[in-house]
Amino acid sequence: MLFLDVDGPLNPFAIHLEALPAEYQVHEMRPDLWADPMLQPLRVCLNPAHGARLLALPAELVWATSWEHDANSWIAPRLGLPELPVVGWPEDLNAHAPADLCWKTPTLLEYAAGRPFAFIDDDITDADRLYAEARCEAPMLFHHVDPAKGLTDADFAVLAEWLGAL
C-alpha cells in the first residue's frame, strides 16, 4: 500500500506562488469538511501529472489525509485518479497518538494490519519510524516530503525503488 497525504506531498502548501512550477494548477476549493460557509476557500496547487505517476507505482493507493473522503471528490479528479480507499481517523486523535508522532501513524499501522506499506507526508519524523518498527515487522517506508516542494522526481524515484524491491 501507498498511504497518500494531500497537503504537503500533493499540494505543496508552503510554496510561494511565484516559485510554483509551471506544471502545477492552482485551484480554490471548499471541501465538504469545511461546514462553515464563512471560511475562505483553500488555495490548492496540484500537478495533474502526479496522478499517472502514482498509478504507475506497484502499490494500492490509499488516502491518508485530513481531507478524508473529500480527497476523492476534490483531489482525485484533478489528478486523474480513481476513487481510492480512505483511512478513517479516530474521533479523539490526541488520545490515540503519542505527542512526538505524526497523528496518523498509529492509525496507519492498524489499517495496514501487518501488510507492507509506504507513507508519504510532510509531518513524518524519525519518531514515527521508530514507533512503527517497534510495533510491526512488515516492510515500511516513512517518506518525508517537503511541503514547499511537494512530490518531486527524487521522491518518485525513492518510492519506485522501495516498492519495486518488495
Image (tube, rainbow, N blue to C red):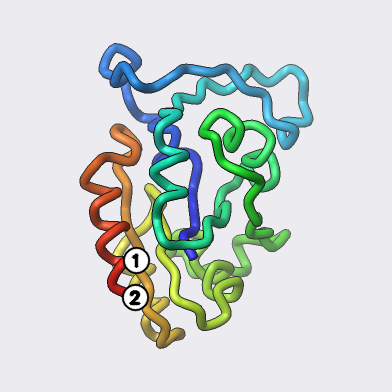
Q: Label 1, on which residue? A: 163
User: Mark 2 near mark 1, Cβ–Cβ under 8 Å?
Assistant: yes
Q: Amino acid at mark 1?
A: Leu
At 70% across and 45% down in the image, what residue appears?
A: 69
At 46% across and 49% down in the image, what residue appears?
A: 55
Along the line of sight, the residue nearer the viewer: 35 or 80 = 80
Residue 166 is marked as 2
At 52% across and 56% down in the image, what residue appears?
A: 61
Along the line of sight, the residue nearer the viewer: 99 or 82 = 82
In this rendering, would 156 be left or right of 99? Answer: left
Q: Residue farthest to the top?
A: 18
**Residue 51, image x and y in percent?**
47, 39
Q: Secondary structure at mark 1?
A: helix
- Inter-mark Cα distance, 2 to 1: 5 Å
Quarter that holds the C terminus = bottom left
Please determine whether, in this image, residue 35 is positioned above or below residue 83. above
**Residue 134, image x and y in percent?**
39, 85
Q: Secondary structure at mark 2?
A: loop
How crowded pointer 1 is (Cα within 10 Å; few <14, some 14-19, many 20+) is rated as many
The reply to whether residue 19 is in sight is yes
Please determine whether, in this image, residue 21 is positioned above or below residue 145. above
